[in-house]
Image: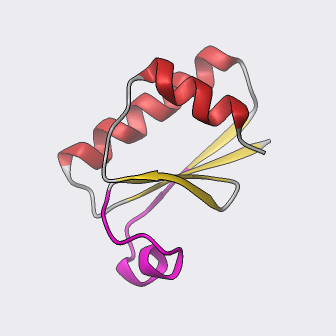
Amino acid sequence: MKKIQILGMGCPKCNKLYAAAEAAAKELGIEYQMEKIADINKITDMGVMMTPALAVDGKVLLSAKVPTVEELKKIIGGAG
């Protein structure tokens, strides 16, 4: 099961990324667990300086942008 983490303080872009990542995971038909990380200390500990950011299984794969669902499918599907 993939652990998909959205790092951000709850801004509109963070919420958009969460929804898009969840849609991508559903379209891929994979087992996944979504998690929001809003704690600034945890976010910076993961090396993220600009949000929103996406991590899969603890590995940060993108930050400071909200890609399309199609782009996210490639990122999430290729992770791991």
Is 58 left, or right, of 54 in this rendering?
right
Determine whether 66 is above or below 73 in the image: below
Residue 47 covered by magenta stretch: yes
Q: Quadrant of the N terminus?
A: top right
Find residue 64 and report its horizontal and vertical position in percent: 31, 53
Is 46 left, or right, of 49 in this rendering?
right
Q: Quadrant of residue 75?
A: top right
Determine whether 59 is above or below 67 in the image: below
Q: Quadrant of residue 57?
A: bottom right
The boundaries of the magenta stretch are 35-51
Determine whether 41 is above or below 16 in the image: below
Is 45 left, or right, of 15 in this rendering?
right
Q: Quadrant of the C terminus?
A: top right
Q: Quadrant of residue 74?
A: top right
Residue at image x 74%, y 26%? Answer: 30
Find residue 26 and report its horizontal and vertical position in percent: 60, 21
| Image colouring | secondary structure
Residue at image x 45%, y 22%? Answer: 69
Residue at image x 31%, y 59%? Answer: 51
> How many numbered marks appear?
0
Is 8 left, or right, of 60 in this rendering?
left
Find residue 23 and report its horizontal and vertical position in percent: 49, 23
